[in-house]
Each structure stands twice: as C-alpha cells, then as structure tokens.
Image (cartoon, helix red, strand yellow):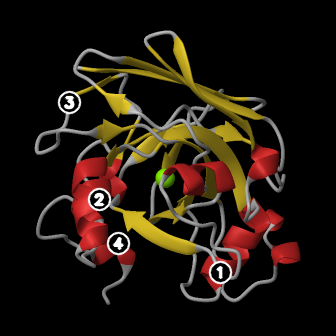
Amino acid sequence: MAEDSKVHFAFKPIIRGMVISESADLFPIGKVYCVGRNYSDHAKEMESKLDQDQPFFFSKPAQAVTQSNSIPFPTQTENLHHEVELVVFLKSGCSDISPSEASQHIFGYAVGVDLTKRDLQTAAKKNGKPWDLSKGFDNSAPISKIQKNEGVLLSKGVISLKVNGQEKQSSNLLHMAWKVDELISWLSKFITLKAGDIIFTGTPSGVSTLNLNDKIEAEIENVGTLSFDLI
Ligand code: MG
C-alpha cells in the first residue's frame, strides 16, 4: 500500500461521522453489530427463547446509521417495527479479550433504534434466509448524539420508547441477558474489533408497528434522548 500522503482514491470514500455531545469532533462509524434476543421478555414476544449459551449477532452497514430527525418511511414493507437499544461505541481495537478487559475500549454510548421490516424478517426466518434486507436498509439505525463515557461499563438504567406520545417499550438495562462487557468479549473472539465499531445491544419487549408520520421518542437514563419522525 502506498504511503498515506500519496494515496489517491478512485472516488471519495464515504466515512460516516456522528455527532458527539459537547464536542466538535465527529465519531467515525466502523462496523455495526447488533445482538438479537438479549432481553427474555422480547424473546418471548417473538415466540423465541433467550440464547443462554451464546449470543447471536447480525450486522448493519455503517451507512444505515443516521442522526437525522426526519427519516423517510422505508419502502418494501407492510410492518416496520421499532426496537429501542443501548448502543456502545468503541475507541480502540481488540481481539480475543475477556469481559474484564472490555471496558477500556469503550468510548461512549447512545440511544438507538434498530428499525426492522418485521414482515421481511419473519419470511427470512421461516425460509432460513439472511436478515440483511429486513435489518440493514437505509436509515435503519437512527441514533442519538453520542454520550462520551470512556472506560465506563453501563449496566443499569431505564430504557424506554414512545410512539406519538404513547409508551410502547419500558425496561431496564439490568435485564440484558448478555452485558456490554460480555458482548464485546464475545464478538472479539470471532472478529477483530476496531476503533469506530459500534454494537446495538438488543431490545426489551413492546415492539410494535410504525406508520407514516409517526413520531418516535426514545430515552435511556444517563445516556440521552432520541427523537425522529417518519416522513
Ligand atoms: Mg434489535
């Protein structure tokens, strides 16, 4: 590879930079992982079980992440769902680490919504097909401003989401089956994590159908608030 100063890309690379609360710097988004079924009440409502033995992950493209407060209603779905989630941001890379080594890699947190085309996901599950198009579409990962909280392991706090002012999801991070440090450690055994990588940590119960013009407001205690409209 050429020295950095001599690199010429064929076209301008796309780097997604996300706003950090009370900072002029942007956070450059790397890989985006999401854990499935991490709260038992949500696993139950999906007619599924918690994965006690091992967590499972899927990913979204970095370009799915957005901080826009107006999100165009996605095409190709009759059943768009919200899933409010704590999102973890990494400031350094790691590979094959233990849970006790995980916190030193944490940059901070945000409130996120894992938007899901439930109809497409249900069909994919039934047919043993991948989830990419039901989970990784444009703007499918709205997040709040990033709350810098370096090296801090967040393990409790109320997590909630309202649609048009009506509460749909309300739980506590205490109920996560796999904690933040365990998720980072687990992932690092399979993939080299890098600075910029982020992890959506799963949703509690109460997921429901979203419609055009809905206003979504989500909040996590000590992390922040997220608000967007589907237009
Ligand atoms: Mg999710």
Is residue 142 at least partly visible in the picture? yes
- Vertical placement of 82 versus 17: above or below? above
Callout 1–callout 4 Cβ contact below 8 Å: no
Secondary structure found at label 4: helix
* Residue of label 2: 121
**Mark 1 — residue?**
54
Looking at marks 4 and 2 on the same chain, the residue that comes earlier in the sequence is marked by: 4
Spatial separation of the CA atoms under disc 4 and disc 2:
44 Å
Q: Point out the tag, 3 or 1, that comes first from the N-terminus.
A: 1
Most extreme residue toward the right, as rendered?
Answer: 100
Say above or below: 183 vs 139: below
Q: Position of residue 143 (x, y in %)?
A: 48, 37
- In primary-sequence order, the first of circles 1 and 2 is 1
Whole-percent x and y of residue 207? 47, 38
Q: Nearer the viewer, mark 3 or mark 4?
A: 3
Q: Residues within 10 Å of mark 3 (few under 14, many from 20)?
A: some
Which mark's residue is nearer the viewer, 1 or 4? Answer: 1
Q: On the image, numbered disc 3 is attached to which residue?
A: 73
Residue 97 spot, x, y in % from top left? 76, 84
Q: Nearer the viewer, mark 3 or mark 2?
A: 2
